[in-house]
Image (cartoon, rainbow, N blue to C red):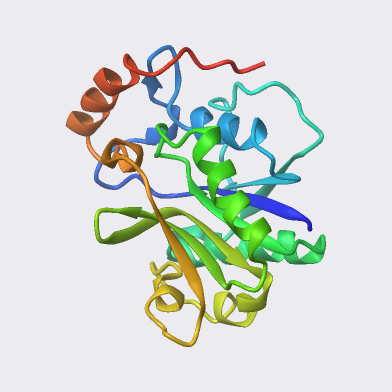
Amino acid sequence: MRTAGVVLAAGQSQRMGEDKINLALSGAPLGSYAVNAALHSHLDLVILVVRADDPLRWLVNSPNDRLIITRCTDSKLGMSHSLRCGWKEAADRGMDCVLILLADQPLVQTEHINALLDVYSSAPELHYVAAKDGDVVKPPLLLSSKVSSVIFKLEGDTGARSIIRNSAYAGKQIPFDKEVFYDADTPDALLYLGKLMDSYKEVDFS
């Protein structure tokens, strides 16, 4: 089974007022944490989707032959366009499943990624394996290549929730601690994330 992670880092950061993935968080740029967690996981490939004009100054992760950088020329049209860019890269490389990660969720750890992969590995007939915050499904989200036709039809600023909500698709939902899902949409949220990071182990970017 071939597995790919797609890290979505091509957002417009409208609520933050500046490009948030560049902002410092506990000694490293915010966007680097999700990439690092993915590279340390059991994923075979990590596809990083960025804006066409991103200089990638925030990417402090060591060079890795498992990391593919994809520039999405129409990312400003909504998240679905970034997702489709990453998905196409994964599909072209024959991946059996894609695990979607957000670059502004720095508390998603390697262990969370591996937990989703382990569930799918034991039940590859599933269409998805989703992380769950209480009763709400949130990224990270693993999707089987069997739903490719749905992903390529997505438009605007929508994700893959239509798959989760459709009873025709089989899946499992894995509950994680609420803190895992915190993202940095505003300056106050970034400050709060900084406090939460203090309770996590030091991150190794090697």
Nearer the observer, 120 or 200: 120
- Vertical arrangement, residue 119 with respect to residue 92, above or below: above
Find residue 185 and report its horizontal and vertical position in percent: 27, 41
Nearer the observer, 121 or 147: 121
Residue pushed farthest bottom? 168
Nearer the observer, 24 or 7: 7
- Vertical arrangement, residue 122 with respect to residue 41, above or below: below
Q: Quadrant of residue 132?
A: bottom left
Q: For the point 53% across and 26% down, which residue is it?
A: 58
Is any atom of residue 74 visible in this view? no
Find residue 63 and report its horizontal and vertical position in percent: 75, 25
- Vertical arrangement, residue 125 with respect to residue 82, above or below: below
Q: How many marks?
A: 0
Left or right of 116: which side holds 198?
A: left
Left or right of 6: which side holds 112?
A: left
State the quadrant of the C terminus. top right
- Vertical arrangement, residue 182 with respect to residue 192, above or below: below
Q: For the point 61% across and 51% down, which residue is it?
A: 117
Residue pushed farthest front? 122
Is any atom of residue 20 visible in this view? yes
State the quadrant of the N terminus. bottom right
Q: For the point 37% across and 78% down, which residue is it?
A: 165
Q: Quadrant of residue 107?
A: top left
Find residue 46 and report its horizontal and vertical position in percent: 68, 44
Q: Quadrant of residue 86?
A: bottom right
Find residue 12 and report its horizontal and vertical position in percent: 39, 49
Q: For the point 27% across and 28% down, which residue is it?
A: 190
